[in-house]
Image (tube, rainbow, N blue to C red):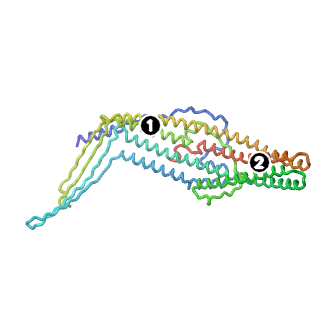
Amino acid sequence: MKRFLLVSVAALALSSCSLTPDYTRPDVGTPAAWHIDAKTGVNVTADWWGNFNSTELNALIIRALENNNDLRAGIHRIEQARASLKIAGADMYPSMDGSGNVSWSRNNPTSGKTTSENSGRAGVGVAYEVDLFGANQAAVDAATANVEGAVADRQALALTVMGDVATTYFTILNLNERIDIAESNLKISREVLRIVQAREDAGSVSGLEVAQQKTIVANTEAGLASIREQRVNAYNALAVLLGQPPQTVAVQAKDLSGVTLPAIAAGQPSDLLIRRPDIYSAEMELIAANANIGAARAAFYPSLNLGLDWSVAASPLGDPTATALSLASALTAPIFQGRRLEGGLEQATARQMELAETYRKTVLVAFQEVEDALAAIRASGERQTALDIAATESRRAWELSVKQYDAGLIDFQTLLDAQRSMLSADDTARSARLATYTAAITLFRALGGGWESGAMR
């Protein structure tokens, strides 16, 4: 008994030994500033979509956060990771099992006298593996990092879903605008066709002019049908994001006129390391792999198991006659494993090195996405300004062409060219307007959507 206690105390004293390498975050060359200056504007917060000042968008995103199927699945992935942590943590504690049996016998000898016997036994066993070299603790550390990674993965997914909801919502509003313009232009094209047909009847123009105008009308009708189809598809996509059937989704706003386009402060590049959930998730994978190296190293060293068994026997039942107590310790060390242990360590090390490179790439891609988004915001704004001017001037040119054609100053071909230019410029300008909003959404997402590491643990 005394020897067992000495072994136990010594084992517990050694149980703090760890073979897990010290973790160091991989070095990534972090730029001091962004290429495009974006220091002024709203800061990115967790409710970043509120900066568009659309109550309808706010409500849609809340519905998506509550009902989106991918986000619900993400919750269950977190639950799985936490359950795995419980399993890994169980090896840090003793296990206890109970046992018992009852027997009954009856004897009827030839003498005619009947005898019966009954007996029973009950016992409790306790087993504990001393974590001499930190293998169990390494497993717990890896499982803990996996939980953190699962939480970050869900937040990254939530950021994607919120961005997709906002993009789809703005797309619907933009398509409403394009449909209104297309319907207006179709009326103009049909009116021109009516005038040309009347002139053909009067003999002042040929059938060529009529055919050319009919072509414009048909193309405008086809374009309108395509835009309407795009709107239906956008509604269907929004319904899926909300986790609902398409028939239950409606959008009340008619256009983008009531939506604010915010200026966004990008902050410093170094901020991304704690603001991007995908970067945090990549680091948690790396930390888990680092812990697995510790477990692989510990497999080379002995393991110590302690056991205690206590039992009581009774014959007959209810009359305890004997108790037993046994204590045991076992030290097991690997001698020959056919290079299995070496292979396990090499695999764990290579995995850690792979994930270090994955982490570096994740950070670099994050920098790229912010730079791309900043460039897109600048370019989309400049493009929108130019296209608005083009649309205004093309409509003015069209109106002047109509007057000059009526006065006989230009031929029908010139009128057609002005009409085609106006129709194209109107739709292009409206389409480009959507790009300014999607660029803002992309920047919000690229900056992490207001998330910070540890905020959702």
| N-term mark: 1 or 2 | 1
Which residue position holds label 1?
Answer: 290
Secondary structure under tag 2 reads helix
Residue 341, image x and y in percent?
Answer: 36, 35
Pointer 2 local density, CA inside 10 Å: few below 14, some 14–19, many at least 20: many
In terms of depth relative to the viewer, which is nearer, 361 or 196? 196
In terms of depth relative to the viewer, which is nearer, 43 or 119? 119
The numbered mark at residue 426 is 2
Q: Classify residue 279 as left or right of residue 165.
A: left
In terms of depth relative to the viewer, which is nearer, 9 or 104? 104
Q: Residue furthest bottom?
A: 112
Residue 54, image x and y in percent?
Answer: 67, 53
- Dots 1 and 2: beta carbons under 8 Å? no
Residue 277, image x and y in percent?
Answer: 54, 43
The numbered mark at residue 141 is none
| Foreground disc of the pair 1, 2 | 2
